[in-house]
Image (spheres, rainbow, N blue to C red):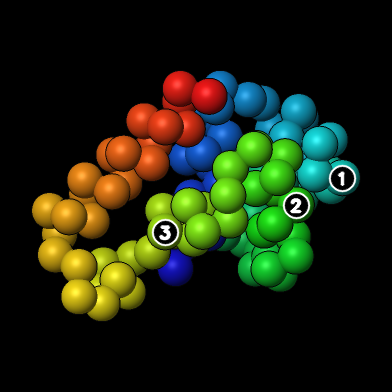
Amino acid sequence: MKIGKALKLCRSARDLSLEVVAERAGISTSYLSRLENDKREPSLALIGKVAEALNIPVPVVVFLAAEPGELKGMDKQTEQRFADLALGLIRQQ
């Protein structure tokens, strides 16, 4: 699972800077950068804070963080459709 990649993807989709999201989440910009670059493993509580700062439900972040094979029973095409849909909705808000 690549939580950092998903957080960065969501932040970029929202067109928000590291500074803005870090401030909203109550963490330092450098720590958020380390999270996004998978140099730190966030707790579920911290994922929740960052997701809230992005105004994105935690399950969406977790879904986007899933790596191939982690979504049991979902074929690649369906997985991609869900990911595209989720990102489309994130960009609209």
In front: mark 3 or mark 1?
3
Neighbour tally class for label 2: few under 14, some 14-19, many 20 plus, Cα within 10 Å = some
Between the C-alphas of marks 2 and 3, the distance is 17 Å
**Where residue 24 sits: x, y (%)?**
81, 36
Q: Kindly identify the residue that appears in the image at 51 percent across and 59 percent down.
A: 59
Of the residues shown, which amino acid type is indicated by label 3?
Answer: Phe
Q: Kindly identify the residue that appears in the image at 72 percent across and 39 percent down.
A: 53
Q: Sequence order check: which comes first, mark 1 or mark 2?
A: 1
- The mark found on residue 49 in the picture is 2
**Where residue 22 sits: x, y (%)?**
78, 39
Q: Decide which of 28, 84 is in the foreground and name it.
A: 84
Asked whether, in this view, residue 1 is left or right of residue 23, the answer is: left
**Where residue 14 sits: x, y (%)?**
55, 27
Please give the residue where the numbered disc 3 appears in the rendered image. Answer: 63
Asked whether, in this view, residue 30 is left or right of residue 84, the answer is: right
Between the C-alphas of marks 3 and 1, the distance is 24 Å
Label 2: state its secondary structure. helix
Neighbour tally class for label 1: few under 14, some 14-19, many 20 plus, Cα within 10 Å = some
**Where residue 65 sits: x, y (%)?**
44, 58
Label 1: state its secondary structure. loop
Query: Do the numbered discs 2 and 3 sit on residues whose CB atoms are within 8 Å?
Result: no
Query: Do the numbered discs 1 and 2 sit on residues whose CB atoms are within 8 Å?
Result: yes
Q: Kindly identify the residue that appears in the image at 63 percent across and 25 percent down.
A: 16
Q: Is residue 7 above or below residue 55?
A: below
